[in-house]
Amino acid sequence: SFISPLDDECALLADGVSTFNAHTKNSFDLRAYVIFEDGDIVAIEKLLNLKGHNSHFPCRSCEIQGVRDITGRGKVYYTPLHTPDVPHQSRQSLDPWNLPMHTHHKFLQTVNSIADTPTKSRKQRLTKESGIKGFPSLQRVGSLDYARSSPWDWMHLFLENVIPTLVSHWSDSFKDLNSGTEDYIIPRDIWEEISEETAHATKDIPSSFVHVIGNIAKDHSNFTAESWGFWFMHIAPFVLRGCFLSEKYYVHMCKLVDLMKVMIKFELTHTEINDIERGLIEWVEEYER
């Protein structure tokens, strides 16, 4: 792995590097340890050597099992809390307040089991049933908790995934899926008006707050995390008001907006953290209904 030299340096730093203390005029062994890994979803998956977010067990934090359209021979896995009430689905629904979380000990057990398994077919089965492919990239020192040392990146999680996905749903462009029995799709002509209103709303805002936001009705490819964040939290609550056929979708969106505004505060109290957790769980459960 390209990161092996870093793993070697981490081992040297953990063992100690002779360092001179200019204040006491003495030498001492300086030690340093990596205790967190930060990066986007794909980068962390590679560091932890996981199958990834499209696998049967896609989450690096919990053991949620993906489901797919077995009857229709679907190949894409989704991870709803509540298992769809359709034929051939045997997975138990999950309580969001009591998710089966990964632990460092179980992670190591699984990795060692995969390494000790003599047959290729058995290794593949263990990998599919756990989502883990093998030993992580950083493993020599042992200062990392593989279940907890890679917190989710807010920017990629919300601004590069959740928000674009919601807009794709609302604009009827999410993986060729229609709205089914729901009515959350906003017509194309209204999206054109939303795009014009967005342009008018941002043209006089200093660039230190947000750069030019493109035409959200035609092309999202030039949208950055900054664009998505500013549009969703500060513009969408105004330009999307009255655009949904049912008010419940607008209310649902605003709940997430309120939660995200709290999340980006410079300081959070324990009460606010608990409120965010409760709010996100309720938001996801309402999303699935």
Image (tube, rainbow, N blue to C red):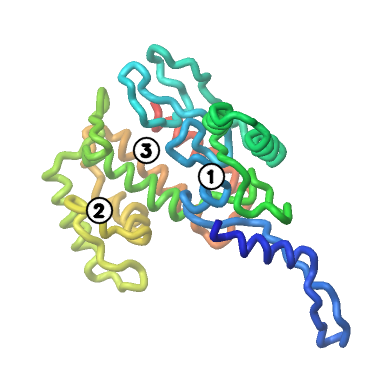
The correct choice, above or below, for 212 with respect to 69 in the image is: below
Q: Nearer the viewer, residue 148 or 251?
A: 148
The quadrant of the rendering that contains the C terminus is top left
Q: Earlier in the sequence, mark 2 or mark 3?
A: 2
In three-dimensional space, the C-alpha distance between marks 3 and 1, rounded to whole angstroms, equals 15 Å
In three-dimensional space, the C-alpha distance between marks 2 and 1, rounded to whole angstroms, equals 28 Å
Q: Residues within 10 Å of mark 3 (few under 14, many from 20)?
A: some
Q: Nearer the viewer, residue 92 or 37?
A: 37
Residue at 63% across / 35% down in the picture? 114
> Can residue 98 be seen from the camera position used here?
no
- List x then y, in percent, for residue 124: 53, 31
The quadrant of the rendering that contains the N terminus is bottom right
In three-dimensional space, the C-alpha distance between marks 2 and 3, rounded to whole angstroms, equals 22 Å
Q: Nearer the viewer, residue 41 or 51?
A: 51
Say whether residue 123 is left or right of residue 25.
Answer: left
Q: Secondary structure at mark 3?
A: helix
Residue 220, label in figure = 2
Residue at 54% across / 60% down in the picture? 2
Which amino acid, by three-letter code, is at mark 3? His
Q: Secondary structure at mark 2?
A: loop
Which amino acid, by three-letter code, is at mark 2? His
Q: Do the residues bearing badges 2 and 1 touch, measured as CB atoms within 8 Å?
A: no
For the image, the number of numbered tags is 3
| Residue at which label 3 appears | 252
Q: Earlier in the sequence, mark 2 or mark 1?
A: 2
- The quadrant holding residue 176 is top left
| Residue at which label 1 appears | 276
Residue at 23% across / 40% down in the picture? 173
The correct choice, above or below, for 108 with respect to 204 in the image is: above
Q: Residue furthest left?
A: 189
Which amino acid, by three-letter code, is at mark 1? Ile
- List x then y, in percent, for residue 102: 63, 37
